[in-house]
């Protein structure tokens, strides 16, 4: 099977699952006789307070600005000092790619930065992995806080989610995946040892990647890095609050509801689907209905508008960043 065909099949499966989950979510959107579901979503959008939605867009861009600066900090110990504008553009292009290829944005932003600033891909990719580790720690802490505050409701909600396989079956599947992964890595290593050129390329990449990973231990201002990390997630939390306030059906739910929504939404966004699309549209409405007795139609409409608005912001910012990147790369080529 050719790599292109394999990639096409994998992406088709991802898109198929996403469409299926969105369809499943839309089934819960019950409208009056003669009313169209699209019209209902439009009505929900028209009823939303646009000031709060604009505030969310501003806060979202602020979080991206902080993230771009934090990423730039990680590359300095390795001896690379990309411009802030280049790291920001690359970050936004990565978000755009993530909407199409799950986790593809992590690699694409490194290549984008290389085109703009000649920062080696292996170095920047190592720093991206560091970022993801730090973000995972922050996310787990925040989810833990959410569960501590809303433990009874969230645990009760999780109990309502049906899982077909037993615990023993899950552990057995994980065991097989682990063994398969180890055997696969051993096979790759054997192939590389047989091909000197490939081996040297991989070793070169690994050396740069490891250097990028170790930058976390060489930061000159650890306090500022921690502050940026906490600020990013605080801004994410405030974003969720502004969106709840934007809709009449959710504006009175309070901060506790933001915690629950953030916990459920974060788990859904971790699914290997473009931008969490599909999983988000299923889990969040169920959570709003179960935890806060929100009518299912209102919960589904709220989720579609929330996720759609967030995605629209990423598409616009990402597309503009891609155009600016293209312009700058062409300009640099002319200068050279």
Image (cartoon, helix red, strand yellow):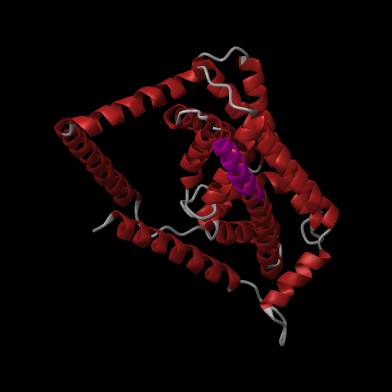
Residue 131 in the image: x percent, y percent? 53, 30
Residue 290 seen anywhere in this rendered image of the structure: yes
Residue 259 in the image: x percent, y percent? 68, 44
Query: Is residue 328 within the magenta segment?
Result: yes
Viewer-proximal residue among 62 and 277: 62
Query: Is residue 232 within the magenta segment?
Result: no
Q: Residue 292, located in which quarter of the rendered image? A: bottom right
Viewer-proximal residue among 237 and 206: 206
Up-down relation of residue 139 to residue 2 (above or below)? above
Q: Quadrant of the C terminus?
A: top right
Viewer-proximal residue among 300 and 146: 300
Residue 93 in the image: x percent, y percent? 58, 45
Query: Relative to 124, is 297 on the left or the right?
Result: right
Residue 220 in the image: x percent, y percent? 59, 12
- How many numbered marks does the figure carry? 0
Looking at the image, which residue is at 47% across and 46% down?
104
Up-down relation of residue 269 to residue 65 (above or below)? below
Up-down relation of residue 3 to residue 151 (above or below)? below
Q: Residue 325, located in which quarter of the rendered image? A: top right
Residue that sits furthest to the bottom in the current view? 34
Q: Main secondary structure of the magenta part?
A: helix
Query: Relative to 325, is 100 on the left or the right?
Result: left
Looking at the image, which residue is at 72% across and 87% down?
34
- Residue range in magenta is 320-334
Residue that sits furthest to the left in the current view? 194
Looking at the image, which residue is at 67% across and 53% down?
316
Query: Relative to 19, is 197 on the left or the right?
Result: left
Looking at the image, which residue is at 70% across and 61% down?
305
């Amino acid at each position: 099977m050719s790599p292109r065909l394999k990639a096409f099949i994998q992406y088709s499966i991802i898109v198929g699952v996403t469409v299926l989950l969105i369809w499943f979510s839309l089934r819960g959107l019950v409208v009056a006789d003669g009313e169209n579901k699209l019209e209902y979503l439009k009505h929900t959008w028209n009823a939303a307070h646009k000031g709060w939605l604009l505030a969310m867009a501003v806060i979202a861009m602020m979080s991206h600005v902080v993230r771009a600066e934090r990423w730039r900090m990680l590359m300095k110990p390795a001896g690379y000092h990309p411009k802030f504008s280049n790291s920001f553009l690359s970050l936004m292009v990565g978000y755009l790619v993530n909407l199409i290829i799950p986790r593809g944005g992590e690699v694409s932003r490194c290549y984008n930065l290389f085109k703009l600033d000649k920062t080696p891909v292996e170095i920047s990719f190592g720093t991206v992995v560091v970022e993801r580790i730090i973000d995972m720690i922050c996310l787990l802490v925040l989810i833990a806080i959410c569960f501590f505050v809303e433990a009874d409701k969230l645990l009760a909600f999780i109990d309502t989610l049906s899982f077909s396989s037993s615990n023993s079956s899950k552990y057995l599947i994980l065991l097989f995946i682990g063994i398969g992964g180890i055997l696969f890595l051993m096979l790759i290593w054997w192939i590389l040892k047989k091909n000197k050129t490939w081996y040297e390329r991989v070793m070169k990449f690994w050396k740069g990647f490891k250097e990028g990973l170790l930058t976390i231990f060489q930061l000159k201002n650890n306090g500022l890095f921690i502050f940026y990390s906490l600020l990013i997630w605080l801004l994410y939390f405030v974003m969720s609050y502004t969106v709840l306030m934007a809709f009449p059906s959710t504006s009175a739910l309070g901060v506790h509801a933001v915690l629950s929504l953030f916990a459920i939404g974060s788990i859904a966004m971790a699914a290997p689907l473009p931008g969490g699309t599909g999983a988000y549209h299923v889990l969040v409405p169920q959570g709003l209905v179960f935890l806060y007795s929100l009518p299912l139609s209102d919960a589904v409409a709220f989720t579609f508008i929330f996720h759609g608005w967030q995605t629209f912001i990423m598409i616009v910012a990402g597309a503009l960043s891609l155009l600016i990147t293209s312009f700058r790369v062409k300009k640099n080529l002319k200068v050279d």
